Image (spheres, helix red, strand yellow):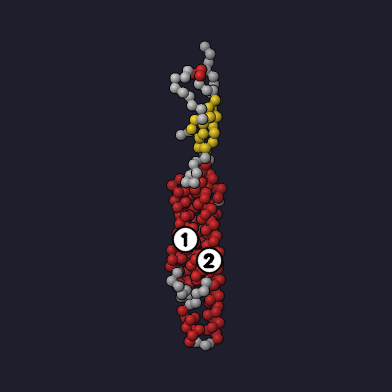
Amino acid sequence: MSEEASVVEEGLSPSQTPLVSVSFERSVNWKQKYLEAEPKALGITQIGLSLFQIISSALFMSKGLSVTPTDIPVIILSLLVLIAGSLTVAAQNLHLPTLRACLGMQIVAVTASIANMIIALVKMNDIPYFCRQYYYYDQNSTSREYCHNIEGTISHFSSECVVINVALVTISITVAAYCCKVTNCCSPAPKMPVITVQAPPAQL
């Protein structure tokens, strides 16, 4: 409902009615703000990086290259980020409930990405179980070199995951900020002044 800047009092005759009135109405293009964030590109990036983490964690888990039981949590958390990315793309239709769902999932995605980042930092010093056996019971230089290579791979992969999750946190915060603008959870809906000029009453 528009907010009238000039109010016509009851009982005034037409000749006393103001000829110019100013009202404030919601901008018809206020939802277009969301599209300024390039949601399709950001959403696809979220989906792609999440899939990379899911596939990589599943591969490491299947090969027994992880010591700490963190691969399943990483997969679950990455799935949440993937869902957030899907909603980022879906919200391009500017449907208000979808935008609100996108905002909620982006907040979840920020938390999930931070958790994945912490897990990646912990995994940097992971040593596979069979490598521990080699270090303590097997003096074969070939086995030691093999384990050193595995440790280097895990360390490099964990470093990449840290960078990936920093990027995902940044993307989620950006999308959430634009969703917040459109859903008016941060500030009232933007309104534009509308000036109405009325024709003077005809003189009889």
Query: What residue did someone put label 2 on?
Result: 161
Q: Give the residue type at disc 2.
A: Cys
Residue sticking out furthest to the top: 204
Query: What residue did someone put label 1 on?
Result: 112
Picture coordinates of residue 85, whole percent (x, y): 49, 56
Comes first in the chain, label 1 or label 2: 1
Name the quadrant containing residue 76.
bottom left
Visible in this render: residue 53? no
Looking at the image, which is closer to me, 148 or 49?
148
Picture coordinates of residue 14, whole percent (x, y): 49, 18
- The structure residue drawn at horizontal position 52% and vertical position 23%, both measured from the top left corner, is 18
Determine the CA span between mark 1 and mark 2.
13 Å
- The structure residue drawn at horizontal position 52% and vertical position 11%, both measured from the top left corner, is 204
Question: In the rendered view, would you say 182 is above or below 105?
Answer: above
- The structure residue drawn at horizontal position 55% and vertical position 82%, both measured from the top left corner, is 145
- The structure residue drawn at horizontal position 50% and vertical position 49%, both measured from the top left corner, is 179
Picture coordinates of residue 156, whole percent (x, y): 56, 71
**Badge 1 local density, few (<14 within 10 Å), some, or many (20+)?**
many
Question: In the rendered view, would you say 109 is above or below 121?
Answer: above
Q: Give the residue type at disc 1.
A: Ala
Q: Secondary structure at mark 2?
A: helix
